[in-house]
Image (cartoon, grey):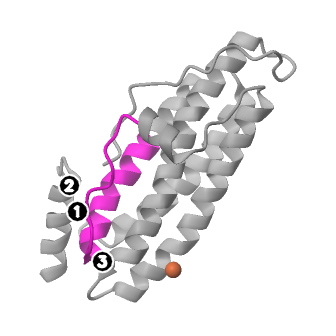
Amino acid sequence: MAKVSKKTTAQGTPKYTVPGLTPEDGARVAALLQDRLNALTDLHLTLKHIHWNVVGPYFIAVHEMLDPQVDSVREMSDTVAERIATLGLSPKGTPGALVADRPWDDYSIGRAGAIEHLGALDLVYAGVIQDHRKAIEATDDLDLVTQDMLIGQAGLLEQYHWFVRAHLETAGGELATAGASSEVEAKERGGRAARR
Ligand SMILES: [Fe+2]
């Protein structure tokens, strides 16, 4: 489950950074971005995992809905990693570094119904978006170019989150996953809603 990150990754001070930023501020921005890179890489891998593991009614709709999200989030990872390099630091993109750095647990659902997965994915997107918004706030005084990049990504992530939530919503606007505090709980609530 994607929880709110508590940790930023120290990468040292760069020998150079973008003009107009101090090397120290470049390092601060890069540390924020390394955490976002970890979250986005984790997200596009998790989206593929769900694409492979959905079963039952709505299989093909959800299976096919997820691939454009995988491609888009993968592109976001690339943009964030290249921004870290632009700032004069080394982006860490290996699976081992990601697992060692991330403060959240691996996605916990295997083969399951499409709406059950979307229940769990609702929580995953919520965690990633919450952290993206924190990074947007943190870059307000640091680097508006990075902030602009993150704002564009957050808009897309929020749209994909809506695609997921629309499957879990009643005509009255209530979410089946409201109040769920874990992926398993959200999955079960999604499953119950699909059977109604
Ligand atoms: Fe596929």
Q: Secondary structure at mark 1?
A: loop
Three-letter amino acid code of the residue under disc 1: Glu
Q: Nearer the viewer, residue 178 or 111?
A: 111
- Tell me: residue 56, above or below residue 68: below
Q: Which mark is residue 174?
A: 1
Query: In the rendered view, does 86 fall on the left or right side of 171?
Result: right
Residue at 54% x, 31% y is: 135
Q: Nearer the viewer, residue 2 or 49?
A: 49
Residue that carries the numbered disc 3 in the rendered image: 114
User: Which of the image's four quarters has the C terminus?
Assistant: bottom left
Q: Is residue 140 at least partly visible in the picture?
A: no
Q: x, y percentage for residue 193?
A: 16, 74
Three-letter amino acid code of the residue under disc 2: Ala
Assess disc 3: are there few (<14), some (14-19) or many (≥20) residues with their C-alpha within 10 Å of its C-alpha. Answer: many
Residue contact between numbered discs 1 and 2, judged by CB atoms under 8 Å: yes
Q: Estimate the spatial distance between the alpha carbons at disc 3 and disc 1, rounded to whole Å.
A: 19 Å
Q: Is residue 95 at least partly visible in the picture?
A: yes
Query: In the rendered view, does 142 fall on the left or right side of 101?
Result: right
Point out the residue furthest to the right here: 19
Residue at 73% x, 37% y is: 83
Residue at 87% x, 20% y is: 19
Q: Estimate the spatial distance between the alpha carbons at disc 1 and disc 2, rounded to whole Å.
A: 8 Å
Q: Secondary structure at mark 2?
A: loop
Q: Which mark is residue 178?
A: 2
Of the residues tagged 2 and 3, which is closer to the observer?
A: 3
Residue contact between numbered discs 3 and 1, judged by CB atoms under 8 Å: no
For marks 2 and 3 on the same chain, the one whose residue lies earlier in the sequence: 3
Q: x, y percentage for residue 140?
A: 62, 23
Region in magenta: 102-130
Q: x, y percentage for residue 72?
A: 61, 62
Q: Secondary structure at mark 3?
A: helix
Three-letter amino acid code of the residue under disc 3: Ala
